[in-house]
């Protein structure tokens, strides 16, 4: 086998030139393009990773915000329930206070009504007693309306303080009221009894007053002495009313 070294050398040169041309005008641009494509791909991947990270962060933030909203909602509902319960308790307390006030007012009104009824009954009883007493006095002998009260009036005057007795009838007539006009004998007896009690002569003036029902009443500047059926009935009525009250 014979080798043509010139042909082999030319072909080698041609191959080297072809390799140089390919490396110069094909491989380098392609490599650069591939590098650029790889860089772009890496940049796209970095952008995707960044976008994914941002999306994950946004999702976490949204999740936290949703949890915060849920917590705020729970807190608001709890506060609303607490406020409603407090308002309910306040309204209940106000209602109970008003009810207690109404009950107290009702008890006061009932007590006052009972007191008014008792007072009215006492007044009616007093009026009835006066009416009964007047009817009974009308059935008694006329002298009984005066004679039975002369000694009682004199005894009451005798129990007054000495200074008070000394001023009765001192330089002026003794004014008396009687259930009816006195007879001469009754006036004389009454004068004698008063003179004995006062220890000096006295003049008396008697004014009839049928409202006394029976008895005598002495009206002096320093003392009033009542010995009448009307005064006794008034005291009884006052005592009954006081006990009833």
Image (spheres, rainbow, N blue to C red):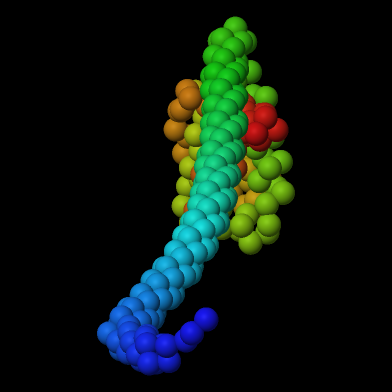
Relative image position of residue 105 (x, y in whole percent): 54, 36
Q: Nearer the viewer, residue 117 or 93?
A: 93
Identify the residue at image location x=57%, y=28%. Answer: 110
Identify the residue at image location x=48%, y=42%. Answer: 175
Residue 15 appears left or right of 72 = left
Does residue 32 lie above or below 108 as drawn? Answer: below
Identify the residue at image location x=59%, y=12%. Answer: 132
Can residue 143 be seen here?
A: no
Q: Nearer the viewer, residue 229 or 29?
A: 29
Q: Residue furthest top?
A: 139
Q: Nearer the viewer, residue 75 or 203?
A: 75
Identify the residue at image location x=56%, y=35%. Answer: 99
Does residue 1 lie above or below 215 as drawn? Answer: below
Relative image position of residue 176 (x, y in whole percent): 51, 38
Q: Residue furthest left?
A: 25
Q: Residue furthest front?
A: 1
Q: Which image quarter is the C terminus in?
A: top right
State which quadrant residue 36 falls in.
bottom left
Residue 140 appears left or right of 177 = right
Q: How many marks?
A: 0
Relative image position of residue 26 (x, y in whole percent): 30, 81
Can residue 21 be seen here?
A: yes
Relative image position of residue 208 (x, y in whole percent): 45, 28
């Amino acid at each position: 086998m014979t080798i043509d070294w010139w042909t082999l050398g030319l072909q080698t040169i041609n191959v080297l030139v072809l390799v140089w041309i390919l490396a110069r005008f094909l491989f380098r641009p392609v490599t650069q393009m591939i590098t650029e494509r790889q860089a772009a791909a890496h940049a796209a991947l970095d952008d995707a990773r960044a976008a994914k990270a941002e999306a994950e962060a946004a999702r976490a933030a949204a999740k936290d915000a949703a949890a915060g909203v849920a917590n705020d909602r729970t807190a608001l509902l709890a506060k609303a329930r607490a406020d409603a319960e407090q308002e309910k308790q306040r309204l209940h307390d106000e209602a109970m206070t008003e009810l207690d006030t109404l009950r107290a007012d009702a008890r006061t009104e009932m007590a006052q009504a009972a007191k008014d009824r008792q007072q009215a009954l006492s007044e009616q009883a007093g009026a009835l007693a006066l009416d009964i007493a007047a009817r009974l006095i009308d059935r008694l002998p006329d002298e009984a309306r005066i004679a039975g009260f002369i000694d009682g009036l004199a005894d009451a005057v005798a129990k007054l303080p000495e200074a008070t007795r000394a001023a009765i009838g001192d330089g002026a007539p003794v004014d008396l009221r009687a259930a009816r006009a006195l007879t001469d004998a009754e006036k004389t007896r009454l004068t004698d009894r008063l003179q004995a009690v006062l220890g000096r002569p006295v003049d008396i003036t008697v004014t009839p007053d049928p409202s006394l029902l029976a008895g005598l009443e002495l009206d002096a500047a320093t003392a009033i002495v009542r010995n009448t059926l009307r005064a006794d009935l008034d005291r009884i009525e006052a005592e009954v009313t006081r006990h009833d009250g």
